[in-house]
Amino acid sequence: MTGAGPPPDPRDGRFQPMARGLHVALVLVGSLAILSVVVPAPASDVLATLAVIGLLVAPLVRVAWLAQRWLRRGDLRYGLVAVSVLLLVATGALVALR
Amino acid sequence: MNLPTLVIVALGGACAFVGSLGGIGGATLLVPTLLALGVEPKVAAPLGLLTVAAGSLAAGARHLDAGLVHHRLGLTIELAASTGAILGALASASISQVLLARVLGVAALVGAIAALSRTGIRNVPVASFGAEPPGEWPGTLGGQYDLNGRAVPYHARNLPAGLAASLVAGVIAGLSGVGGGFLKTPAMSEIMHVPVKVAAATTTFTLGITASTGLLIFAVQGRLSVDSGAAVVAGAMVGGTVGAHLQSRIDAATLRRLTGIILLAVAAIVIGRTL
């Protein structure tokens, strides 16, 4: 047996894509929000709207990414939990529309 | 709302800065502060949730890298919290301004008690878990995190009670615009026996979802002002990021005590104005 050491743990770095996405979202939303304060209207309104939309959407995209990852890996219980959270959010918006 | 934009930016930054240092969230300070400055609860609540969402996004990557977030646990309790947030947000438009202000005052008071009373170490390092990477264990509500180079395993307990506490936290979040983190984190750590660091990081993750839920409803109801909202987000992101960087250098217990005292003062002012 060679002294190659233990194989890498498959759980290492599993959330790196999500962490990178959060970094990008943070810089994007933060930049839009700061710019919206310093530029004059109507550009400020557009930037402010985009910043708020980005902030609102980012957590939901994160949950959707987790849902597809868990379902693809056979973690059916928590995949369905994640999908249920998204459905709950959508239900709340629909109820508010009435 | 009559507050100048720069004042809103400064308030968002200051509250997120102090909130991230003390681990209680920025909206718990921002919303009562806005009320004390004469802003209506119906206007303050959406701004509070924007601060919550900004803080969650700002801290997310750092917590992920440290293996502190338990996504499965967070989403499980979020089923209850989002339900509460929906109910609270839908009801907030129908509730009187006085009652809403009192709810916020009581929320600040609860936040003060939580900040001033957080103590105790329940989960201890176990050497045999040292070879595994920190993070949640797939398919379970357990995991391990790194404490000064040592692995600390944990597993969430008393799930029904934790779900009930999350439902209450969600209703308060939806009604008042605070994130409810000052209820969720102690519920996870004291009721469900999850380590405080993991509870705080997981709560920060779930607060983003709770805030999105409430904000979506506020947007549908036409109560979301994007110009003042973006201003508070700009301040909160800067303040929250700076606060998170400084957090490791300043004694957390001292900051929690300071934050608790500030919250007590804010609660007294907000409730006193309604009497």
Image: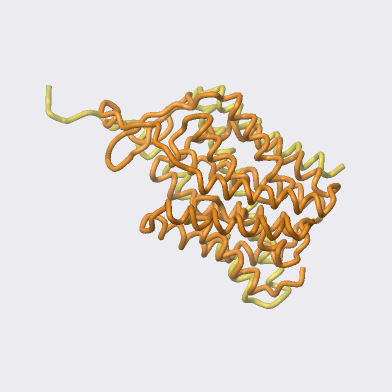
Chain colours: A yellow, B orange
In x, y percent, where is residue B162?
Answer: 58, 30
Residue at 80 percent across and 47 percent down: it is B92
In x, y percent, where is residue B49?
Answer: 66, 52
In x, y percent, where is residue A22?
Answer: 50, 50
In x, y percent, where is residue B143?
Answer: 41, 30
Residue at 55 percent across and 65 percent down: it is B14
Residue at 51 percent across and 48 percent down: it is B116
Farthest residue, direction left? A2
User: Dividing the image into 4 quarters, which one contains the N terminus of chain B?
Assistant: bottom right
User: Dividing the image into 4 quarters, which one contains the C terminus of chain B?
Assistant: bottom right
Q: Identify which residue, A3 or B122, lies in the foreground.
A: B122
Q: In this rendering, is residue B228 above or below B152?
A: below
Farthest residue, direction bottom? A40
Total labels: the figure holds 0
Q: Is residue B247 left or right of residue B157?
A: left
Q: Can residue A28 be seen here? A: no
Q: Is residue B174 left or right of residue A58?
A: right
Q: In this rendering, is residue B162 above or below B25?
A: above
Q: Identify which residue, B126 or B220, lies in the foreground.
A: B126
